[in-house]
Amino acid sequence: VLFEEWHETGGAPRGYVGGAWIDADSAERFDVTDPATGETIATVPRMGRAETCRAVRAAEEAWVSWRTRPARERAAILLDWRDCVLAAEDSLAELMVREQGKPLREAVTEIRYAASFLEWFAEEAKRAYGETIPGDAAQTRVTVQRQPIGVGAAITPWNFPAAMVTRKAGPALAAGCTLVLKPAEQTPLSAIALVALAEQAGVPAGVLNLVTGDAADAPEIGAELTENEDVRKVSFTGSTEVGRLLMRQAATTVKSLSLELGGNAPFIVFDDADLVAAVDGLVQCKYRNAGQTCISANRVLVARSVYDQFIALLTDRVRELNVGSGLDDATDVGPLIDRPALTKVIEHVADAERRGAKVVLGGQPHELGGTFFQPTIVRDVPATAQAFHEETFGPVAFLHPFDDEDEAIRLANDTPYGLAAYFYAQDVDRVWRVSEGLESGMVGINQPMLSTATAPFGGVKQSGLGREGSRHGLDDWLEMKYICQVIK
Ligand code: ADP
């Protein structure tokens, strides 16, 4: 298939509009690089407003028949897409490692996770139930239908290049919406491959469109997607800064918005925690994808009475993590996505040290060079440190001791973000108190992994709007229509 060709030959992947594979009007392309080697692995079209506008038109035209297809038929196509994705699992995973850097086994896990959204929403498509409501007069009949919103725009990030595509395209297509997708400039290849597989699975022309662009093109593409009147919904996963901008732009045409923005997840270890499980959980939650997930633990708060013991256990585990190319079986931690990402991690460690924190392990760029960074543990990080206020997005655990439960909750909530929060404890009363006290859209109790198609993923406060996954993820692509009739 298409993506295997360019994977092998370094050929020319393209965008996809109205069922046709297209280049940019300007014929310009940008490089996609392998973060582990710095090598260019492909070039991709640099599109702008004009191509995006045509993609929206194609989506609008396709919507007319897609929305009226029985849900059962849309579901069948989504299941075929899932099958195509799973059949190509190995090539998709390898392609992802090449453009994104994560270890191959994490990439395989992501492809399966990506496929699970297609399966889940294929099933949910058939359950977009409406309501009947007793009318307020004898002759009044009140019903509520759930109808697809219309043409959607999906703007996705580089940290989960496949799953963020299906987490949006799955519910959109299931609901009967059509979509224009704009993947991150760092990782467009996984998105292109997924779209090629959607075509193979029989997704009709115009239902799923793909425009690609470099960082400099994103504002143009984003402006068209947010200002074009035919786009009814924008679903974005990325930085809070860009989310705010898109929200402002979308205000001009009052679009529906789903925003999955930054996080600043607290990871709290109470004195009654199973410390071995907590260490295990933190290693997964912090070092997976080299710490580049929006639900990565960002602030590790540990009860003072177990603080030293926890750090000792954690240090033993983190010392064992292997850094290297994602293609190497032994690798646990791959490179960071790019230079700015590395610079930010270096700055966060330096800032914490300046404020009196101590590096227990690592703390430096890795000897492999490039964008590799050592798995790092920093202790006694003051709550004023940069790392406690912004996402680090790197393999660094910043630790801070606390004295009691109230202090832990207060520290955890001391952030404008509220995506994920984790805590380890055994006491049942505490488990209720803390999970209810945390200001976040998701809470992991003795559980570091929250992402699944079956549950509503999303944040509160400045971490975003809306939910993805679960039946609520389908709701976000449906509009309610209240229908009132008077009978004789
Ligand atoms: P990150 O900091 O994780 O790279 P960004 O928010 O910059 O997150 O990127 C997430 C997605 O948003 C990417 O697809 C990127 O190209 C896109 N993007 C960045 N700037 C804009 C913009 N002004 N308008 C629309 N999309 C944008």
Image (tube, rainbow, N blue to C red):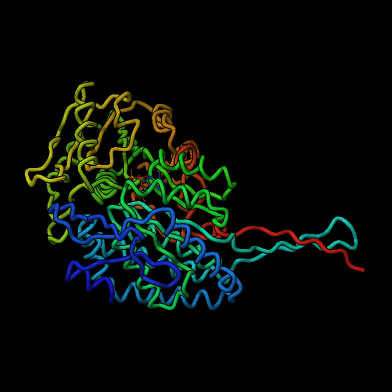
Q: Quadrant of residue 95?
A: bottom left
Left or right of residue 70: residue 378: left
Point 32% across, 33% down: residue? 301
Point 25% across, 55% down: residue? 30
Point 18% across, 55% down: residue? 34
The spot of residue 31 in percent (x, y) is 22, 55
Left or right of residue 379: residue 156: right
Q: Quadrant of residue 414?
A: top left
Counting every numbered tag in the picture gives: 0
The spot of residue 189 in percent (x, y) is 28, 62
Quarter in which the N terminus is drawn:
bottom left
The spot of residue 240 in percent (x, y) is 41, 40
Residue 445 visible in this rendered orientation of the protein: no
Left or right of residue 384: residue 224: right
Quarter in which the C terminus is drawn:
bottom right
Residue 138 visible in this rendered orientation of the protein: yes
Asked if 53 appears above or below 298 in the picture, the reply is below
- Near-viewer residue (294 or 407): 294
Left or right of residue 405: residue 69: right
- Near-viewer residue (227 or 327): 227
Residue at the extreme left of the image, as rendered: 367
Residue at the extreme right of the image, as rendered: 488
- Near-viewer residue (38 or 87): 38
- Near-viewer residue (368 or 338): 338
